[in-house]
Image: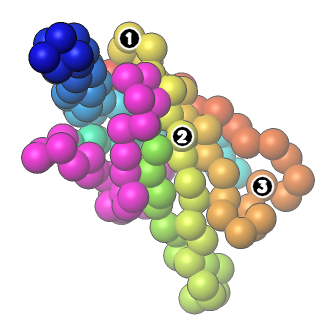
Amino acid sequence: MTRKAFLLPLVLCALSVMVLAQAGVAGKWTGETQGRQGPQPITLELKMAAGKLTGTFTQGAQPAAEITDAKVVDASTISFKRSLAGRGGGDPIVIDYTGKIKGDEMTLTPSAGGGRGGGGRGPTEITLKRAS
């Protein structure tokens, strides 16, 4: 009985932290990244429903793309993927993102799957701010 009395508050506290962390990522995040044609605006819209993270990612003039495999990793980290059309109709390029959240700022680090993209350069961090 003593063990249960100790574990129950601990489990409830952990669940509360997870719920707050998941709700904290939802919303609109904006920023920009350097593209071939100069700065490109980025909008990341995240939604949390029934414990599932979903959303869209828009960069420059491209249409909004649905994100996939979105997860709240911990209280300050998310991850997701987005697909880009391959050049000349080739295979799509999947980009994995890890987002670190601190207050109203998120730092996204992209990495192209399968070793494609980036041309030997390291990942470029993208800073987004929560839109009001």
Reply yes or no: does residue 68 show up in magenta. Answer: yes
Toward the front, the furthest residue is 1
The kind of residue on which mark 2 rests is Thr
Q: Quadrant of the N terminus?
A: top left
User: Callout 2: few (<14), some (14-19), or many (20+) C-alpha neighbours within 10 Å?
Assistant: many
Dot 1 crowding, Cα within 10 Å, few <14, some 14–19, many 20+: few
- Tell me how many marks there are: 3
Q: Is residue 121 left or right of residue 27?
A: right
**Chain part drawn in magenta:** 48-77
Q: Which residue is mark 2?
A: 98
Comparing 36 with 130, the one in front is: 130
Q: Secondary structure at mark 1?
A: loop
The answer to which quarter of the image holds residue 14 is: top left
Q: Percent from the top left, x then y, of residue 92?
A: 56, 78
Q: Are marks 3 and 2 in contact (CB under 8 Å)?
A: no
> Residue, x 71% and y 69% (percent of image)?
114
Question: In the structure shown, which secondary structural element does the residue marked by tag 3 occupy?
Answer: loop
Give the mark nearest the N terminus, 3 or 2: 2
Amino acid type, mark 1:
Gly
Q: Which mark is residue 103?
A: 1
Farthest residue, direction bottom: 89
CA gap, disc 3 to disc 2? 16 Å
Write the residue at 85% across / 47% down. 121
Quarter of the image with the C terminus is top left
Residue at label 3? 118
The amino acid pointed to by label 3 is Gly
